[in-house]
Amino acid sequence: MAGFNRPGSQPPQRRGLFGNRSDSRGGARQPIRRVDSAAPTRAAVSYTSQRAPQRGGGSFGRAITTLITRLVGLGAVVILIVAAVLGARLVISLGEPTQSALPSDAVPSASAGQPLIVAPDPATVATATITVRGSLPDDLLELSNAILRINVVGADGSQRVGAEIELPRTPGFEVNSIPLTEGTNTITAVVVVDGAEKTPSAGIIVTRDNTAPLVEITSPTPGQLVSGAEVTVRGTSEAGVEIQLRNDTSGLTASGTSNNNGNYSVNISLRDGVNLLTVVATDAVGNSSRTSVEITTNASVGRVIVVANPATIFLNKSPKAFRITATATDSTGATVSGATVCMMITAPGLAPISLPCTTSDSNGRAIGEYTFPENYDTEGRGLILVTYTLAQGDPLEATTPITVKKKP
């Protein structure tokens, strides 16, 4: 501190908020500048750095730092203003009504002066109405006091206005619920300004077909006796229609398609006895019709063998138990695996007894066991019924007798 009092020494400079300055110019103390209240906070903070003043270019460096800091703060403000404007435009656009628009690759661009509409695929439908899609050129979009009109001309020459909507705001559009008449319909779109139609679009042809295809069964004939486990159903309909064949008796189904001449041939399995066969023909647009035939067959639908061991129960022996073994094959002789197998026992003096159902194994076999109560003492004959429930078709059933005696 003594060094400050030497002759010729200068008093120390005081560091102000904006850098070093002298307090003794002309013997008067200079006022301290204040930070502009509008200056960004980051710029003000940079002025309070505790670094020691640099020699030579220190003031220039601080000036550059101040300028950069101010520019950064100004840039942040600009970004916030731009984001606010974009957000406001988004909110406004969400509240505006929109016209039905299509992707640019869905409908070609329209030529100047007239709309363009495209035919639906398929162009033959069974419905009473369709949706028309198209596009408008820019010169028609700019019109005011205008509407878009869809005109329909029927096969009989009748004309009608299919729809009128407010002129779309975008090139792509679609108009729903355009009514169709039976047969061919020529559809055009036109812009109407102050009641006057401008140039219409090229017409598209849409055909409404709501007539069901005729279908007949030519073989087998009603009441025919058929031998075997299946039958081939033949008949006629329209060309290329889908044929669905169902055995209403067993629940089995099969399908096919009619050829170019409208003929069809479909095979289906039968159950032993009466079978009701129904054919449904459906065309490409969903129209359908049906017909049926009832036939009789003596086909084998499968076989179940039931064995009770022992088949005779002696009341003077304990336990009074036996095992039931069942094995099943289908109409082709293959084992019936994965079927639900239920067993019921009727014994003299007792109500019917149902054992828990099981599933047949890969050999078509199922096993059940039962033990009579110790106080059971009624003699007589009983019966065991075994039922195989298949995934399709009628259940397979078989029975075997049992006998109850007091002693051998």
Image (tube, rainbow, N blue to C red):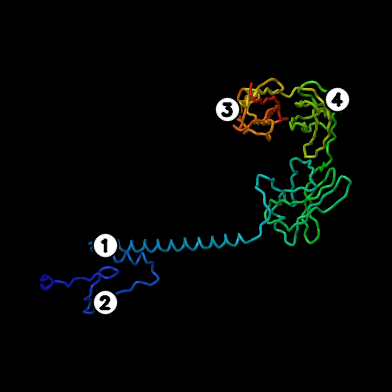
Inter-mark Cα distance, 2 to 4: 127 Å
Question: Which numbered marker is on residue 183?
Answer: none
Examine the image and state in which quarter residue 343 appears.
top right
User: Toward the viewer: 96 or 85?
Assistant: 96
Q: Which residue is mark 1?
A: 58
The image shows residue 376 at horizontal and vertical percentages of: 63, 32
Above or below, comparing residue 291 to residue 308 in the picture:
below
Tell me which label, 1 or 4, sits earlier in the chain: 1
Tell me which label, 2 or 4, sits earlier in the chain: 2
Q: Amino acid at mark 3?
A: Pro
Q: Amino acid at mark 4?
A: Gln
For this orientation, the residue located farthest to the right is 156
Question: What residue is rendered at 47% in x and 62% in y?
Answer: 80
Q: Which residue is mark 4?
A: 224
Question: Which numbered marker is on residue 319?
Answer: 3
Answer few, some or many: residues within 10 Å of disc 2's Cα (few below 14, many 20 plus, some between 14 and 19).
Answer: few
Pair 3/2: label in front: 3
Tell me which label, 1 or 2, sits earlier in the chain: 2
Inter-mark Cα distance, 1 to 4: 116 Å
Check disc 3 and report its element: helix, strand or loop: loop
Q: Which residue is mark 2?
A: 30
Above or below, comparing residue 170 to residue 366 in the picture:
below
Question: What residue is rendered at 65% in x and 44% in y?
Answer: 105
